[in-house]
Image: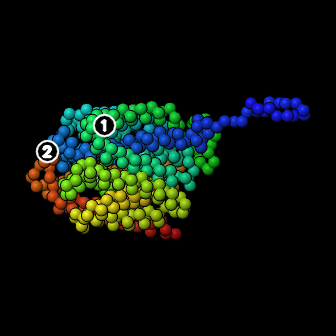
Amino acid sequence: MSTAPVGGFLLAAPAPTRVSLRSDPLQRRWLAWAALVTAYLLMNLHRLSSAVLADRLVVAFDTTAAQLGTLHAAFFYIYAGMQLPAGVLADRYGPRLVMTVGTLTLGLGAAGFALSESYLLAFASRALIGLGGGVTFVATLRFLAAWFRPDEFATMNGLTVAASGIGGILATTPLAVAASTVGWRVAILGLGVVAVAVAGVIYVVARDSPSAAGLEPIEGVEDHPTLTLPEVGANVRLVLAELETWLLAVAMFCTTGAFITLLGLWGVPYLVQVYGLSVTGASWYTLLGSVGLLVGSPAFGRLSDTLGRRIAPMLAGVVAFAAIFLVIPVLGQPPLAIIAAVYFLAGFLGGAFVLGYPIIQERHHVTASGVATGTLNAAAFAGAAVFPTIMGAILDAYWTGETVAGTRIYTAVGYRMAFATTAVAALLALACVSWFARRVRRP
């Protein structure tokens, strides 16, 4: 407390108001976002972990390529199916409760996967990881809509997806080194423990909106009340009735499926078997893809907010994305420098598709934000569930009959044919985004 002279007397002046992380909504939102995005980071680490663990999982559970692809995809089957329910739950019960329960479930699934002794139990545990992780992205976007202005949303969306790029980086060389040092089971079990701790932090620091935290509203941010089930149902019907929703959904199905299958499963075995790299060496290339996503997502989001345009940057990105995914099928075995560029650009250009979330959200009222983004994310990760198994089946068709240390050996032609599916998917995504752009530009 200080003093000030008044009429010859020294009177005590009031102490300045101190702003803290808990009392200032502009600071509090960053604390809560950090907790939420950490859970999303962990989810992405798990969904991309199969690439560097592939040879160990084949030996541990005695799988074929198709079975390994199905085990990897178990996460995505449940994750994709959870996206629309996650949007409903986030709109109905709020992101705080949904994220707390989801992150706790993710941690329990990781522990179960680490301790699994059979393929069936491993499949069920990885599906449980997908069940818990399935709410993380949509609930985080629901939180962003309640705490950030519309002209900040694409940037924050990009930063959130960038966190998944950090998770992807940790799922490459760091996870490979950890698996070699302490064993893959101990490494995954440790990640499960971390997830349980993060769930506790989310429950303590996150709130559904500034008003729910007892804080002043943020200028330019509309309050998000919780909805009744009939209101949520009406939003679901409205979102699903639009052709534009389905065009964006197919584009996300194709691009996310292609990208995650490259970085999350077959990108490492391709380099090991075709180029003779070690698993750790090959993981550096998938790390480049995650770095690309880390850089590209906020870059496209910031560009979109700055220009005030969503569709043009997304369309430019999908054109380049389609070109990148033609490289491996056309060239077969290009120089490793080109492979490095392909992996990095696949991640960087994947940031363009992050704009699909603000596009779909801005087409509907803010109270439908969870349902709208959940619908799009469901399609995206349905692709991530389907493509690994398809590519695994194609590789099995080109199996040489040879195994090394329990791992099947596939030909360069087999990988070329398998990656042709991702190239076709990227071209289909280009067609859908182009159609969408033509529809929304009509008077």
Residue occupying the point 42% across, 59% down = 352
* Quarter of the N terminus within the rendering: top right
Q: Vertical placement of 358 versus 202: above or below?
A: below
Left or right of 421, for residue 367: right
Question: In what element is the residue under mark 1?
Answer: helix
Q: Which residue is mark 1?
A: 188
Marks 1/2 in contact by CB < 8 Å: the verdict is no
Percent of width and height locating residue 41: 40, 44
Where, by quadrant of the figure, is residue 436 drawn?
A: bottom left
Outermost residue to the left: 401
Question: Label 1 crowding class (10 Å Cα cut-off): few <14, some 14-19, many 20+?
Answer: many
Q: Amino acid at mark 1?
A: Ile
The relative height of residue 104 versus residue 335 in the rendered view (above or below) is above
Drawn side of residue 238 relative to residue 222, left or right? left
Q: Residue at x 58, y 37 (%)?
A: 21
Query: In the rendered view, does 274 fall on the left or right side of 429?
Result: left
Q: Residue at x 55, y 45 (%)?
A: 147
> Mark 2 = which residue?
406
- Label 2 SS: loop
- x and y percentages locating residue 99 in the rendered image: 44, 38
